[in-house]
Amino acid sequence: MFHHYLVLLALFLFYGLAGCLYQPQMTELDSDTLSEIQEEFPIDGFGYASDIGILERGEILANQNLYELLEEMGVSQQVIWQVSNELKQKLGFRFLKQNQIYYRYRKHNNFGDVHYAPVLILMESNVRYIKIDLSDGILVQASAKPITIRIRQIEGIIESSLYKSLVLQGHSAGVGIELNEIFAWQIDFFRLYQGDNYRAIYEEFISEGEVVGVGRVLAAVFIHQNSVYKAFYYKDEQQQGYYDSEGNGIQKALLKAPFRYNQRISSSFNYSRFHPVLKQSIPHTGTDYAAPLGTPVIAVGDGEIIECKYKGANGNIVQIQHNDTYRTAYLHLNGFGPNIKKGVQVKQGQVIGYVGRTGRVTGVHLHYTLYKHNVPINSVEVNLPSQESLSESAINKFNLEVQKYSFLLGQGSILSPTNNDSYDVEKNS
């Protein structure tokens, strides 16, 4: 026992002496070498750090204007005038719309008064917005939230309509619109049958964790009355569009009707129709659609506007020359679309006017006529030529795409998680 005490005493004296002999070197800090640690604040979807203030959401009230919003933020009349001028010149912006969403940043303070940071965000859609930043001068900018793309697959059996089939599965009705446009010349989507079924792969747009839109359908199979229709999207430097599994174009040069959605035909093409106003048999060389007043009328194909004016019994009329063979006419319009006038080049699907009741009519409708070599033909029954087939140089690459999507169409559910590829919302939203 005494021996153990001697050992412990020896160890204590050794480490104690060592501790006394060793003195750690103290370095004097130079104040010039010190740097303050900067606090980091999270950045929101509009690109601002949280220290700017508390983001507040609002909705435009009836008759509320930009002047009121900016004045509440403490902006002077002169600056408000300059902002309004910038919006008009740069972005063509003129006025706010009722129920339009906007955001402002309320500053942090311990007082009862409300103060805002000099930033106003005006939403134009779920993703697009206009930023007005007066922090350092006047900045007026059109922008969009970051978007990622998720590839999804949908399949279903028609019980009553394609719309219900999609919505019941939690998918956007926008997918149905895309399918409608792809197969518009092969399938009448307003005459589907129970048991018709479909499968499709499409793009879904995600912003801040929420679905904000539907992109392009990449591949689809639709079985209608036991007939199988397939579509594969393909694009290279020379061609783009939807093709069947053999590379033949499935979309026509002209749409079947000048509407985005199907409208009821109130009077068909007929050379011996009894005219309701003139009370006599007069050839009806067109198709009348009983669409609601103000319904957008679209160009059925690319072409040049050769007539755009008020024309007596025809009312407001637009005529488009599509090529050497086909011309279309749209009569009794309530008004013309943006920038629509004689000599303008238009694209398929572009709004050229709105359904009305101008001219010699008994009610609201659109009279639509399709001409072939300047002779009116029945647009409902005519079999128009298809989109060009793929070139031989593209077939091998296209076949690889067909094999890939044909395999994926059988996999079901979400094919890939949300990716990190940025998406150009200027092109698709």
Image: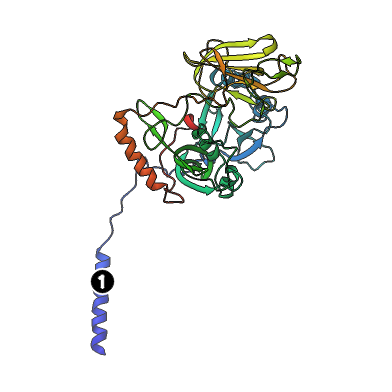
Where 17 sits versus 98, above or below?
A: below
Left or right for 43, reference 248: right
Colour convention of the picture: rainbow
Left or right: residue 23 versus residue 232 is left
Query: Number of callouts in the render?
Result: 1
Q: Quadrant of residue 334?
A: top right
- Specify whether residue 302 is in view: yes
Specify whether residue 34 is in view: no
Secondary structure at numbered mark 1: helix
Question: x and y percent of residue 113 in the render?
Answer: 69, 37
Quadrant where the N terminus lies? bottom left
- Seen from the viewer's position, the closer of residues 428 and 63 is 428
Q: Quadrant of residue 394?
A: top left
Identify whether 338 is placed above or below 291: above
Amino acid type, residue under disc 1 in the picture: Tyr
Residue at the spot 44% in from the left edge and 35% down from the top edge = 423
**Mark 1 neighbour density, 10 Å: few (under 14) some (14–19) many (20 or more):** few
Q: Residue at x 57, y 14 (%)?
A: 319
Residue 38: horizontal and vertical position, in percent? 44, 43
Q: Is residue 74 left or right of residue 131?
A: right
Q: Which residue is mark 1?
A: 15
Identify the residue at horizontal 42%, vertical 50% (top origin).
410
Rendering coords of residue 382 (x, y %):
53, 24
Q: Nearer the viewer, residue 191 or 419?
A: 191
Q: Residue at x 63, y 35 (%)?
A: 101
Q: Nearer the viewer, residue 22 or 376?
A: 376
Above or below, comparing residue 395 to residue 78 in the picture: below
Residue 235 occupies quadrant: top left
Residue placed most toward the observer, 47 or 426: 426
